[in-house]
Image: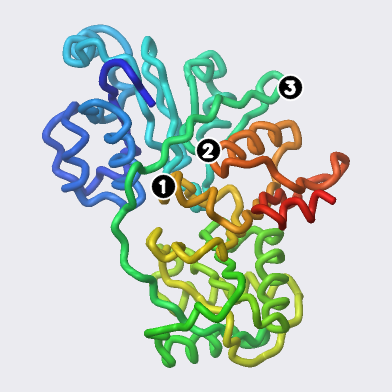
Amino acid sequence: MFKSGTAVISVPPDELKCAELPGSLFEAAQLHRMPISDALKRAAGLVATACRHPVCLVRPEIFTHGQARQWLNARLNGTRHHICLSDGTSVKVIEGLDNHVFFYGLGQRKGSAGLQNLSSWAPEIFSHVRSQINSFHAVVLAGRLVQPPTRLSLPRSRVPAVQPEMYRYVFNPQCPQECARLMVEAGSDPKPTLDEFKELIYIPLSESGSHDAAFSNLAARIIAAAYFDHSQCVLLRLPAANENMPDLAQQMIRTLEAIGASGIVAPRVVAKNVFLLRSDPPESFFDTDRRWSFVVDHTFDFWRYTQRLYPRLRSVRYLYDGDPRQLQGVVHGLSSLLGRPPCARGEPSMSPPRVLTWAQGRLAMARKR
């Protein structure tokens, strides 16, 4: 991705507050031994595979001029690229370098507010952002939509992961707490049988996705339909645990509340073909022959899997709820990732949200007709 020279990366200060730092500038490989989030470790690891010996800079805003900048220049030794690993709260740039931003926590509610803040507070600095890695964000600047070009960077090999815990889904909209208790007490299904289904639908629900009425509504409709179509199996990944959802029961309750808020009615019995997943499956989980469909939104980290996975998917449905002017960039980026153009993107006059659909083979041709 970055062909010449190494790169310097910066990370949010909050991620390093419990770490013992060896200095202001150190080898990025040392991040993996620090108490930082798993998402940041994965993002730093991905950057390391695309760059040659990246180094990590703490608080780049300190090194803007004077002796501090001279000190930095002497140690960067011709480095051309700065990659800001951002949790969405802010975007840092280093003047004189090619700056790129990698939003590694798309599923968090704060999203990419940092990009809009940078354009509002310092529009002259915003122009230093040359690209965004694995995202499709844009900002309004002087009445015009500006979208830093997207660079796709996915792992070259599969990232090790364990099989996720899977819980059989049961839901009564009037008592999500009781439903969560029943599912936790029943425990995960040790050997769920998935071979009998013709289509397997994976819906990763993030923290922000669980607060997105449009995405929760889409997930609720798919789950309700599965109750009456036993050729399908739906796997809904719970949002990750955090300070607001510290345990499995709270993750389930938040998910069930989001599904219930849609108002879509489904049978109040245990679903034999709907599961709640506690974590992301490893890529090997999706090795079955073209039976997997993904239903995602902008919070899904496509970069957690290799490029080889996506062209094999039966279909991908992407809920788009952004500025219509940004749609072309999103479609282009996802089409490059999936290896095919969308077969449906809604009517041009439709206002967001809309569902973009990429399908495989005969299914795509049938929908085109």
Of the two numbered discs 3 and 1 in the rendering, the one whose residue sits closer to the viewer: 1
Number of numbered callouts drawn: 3
Q: Nearer the viewer, residue 296 or 264?
A: 296
**Observer able to see residue 188:** no
* Placement of 204 over or under 368, stated as above or below: below
Q: Residue at image x 72%, y 83%?
A: 228
Of the two numbered discs 2 and 1 in the rendering, the one whose residue sits closer to the viewer: 1
Which residue was labeled with disc 1?
306
Q: For label 2, count other residues whose C-alpha is less than 10 Å away and answer few (under 14), some (14-19) or many (20+).
A: many
Q: Residue at image x 88%, y 41%?
A: 349
Q: Nearer the viewer, residue 33 or 317?
A: 317
User: Label 2, label 1: how many angstroms apart (C-alpha)?
Assistant: 16 Å
Checking the image for residue 139, the label placed there is none
Which scheme is used to colour this image of the protein? Answer: rainbow
Question: At which x and y percent is residue 58?
Answer: 25, 30
Q: In this view, does 315 lie to the left or right of 207?
A: right
Which residue was labeled with disc 2?
135
- Quadrant in the picture for residue 101: top left
Q: Mark 1: which amino acid?
A: Thr
* Placement of 209 over or under 184, stated as above or below: above
Question: At which x and y percent is residue 331?
Answer: 66, 38
Quarter of the figure with the N terminus:
top left
Look at the numbered disc 1 and give the secondary structure of its residue: loop
Of the two numbered discs 2 and 3 in the rendering, the one whose residue sits closer to the viewer: 2
User: Label 3, label 1: how many angstroms apart (C-alpha)?
Assistant: 37 Å
Look at the numbered disc 3 and give the secondary structure of its residue: loop
Q: Residue at image x 30%, y 9%?
A: 65
Look at the numbered disc 2 and give the secondary structure of its residue: loop
Question: At which x and y percent is residue 119?
Answer: 57, 24
User: Label 2, label 3: how many angstroms apart (C-alpha)?
Assistant: 22 Å
Which residue was labeled with disc 3?
143
Question: At which x and y percent is residue 290?
Answer: 55, 61
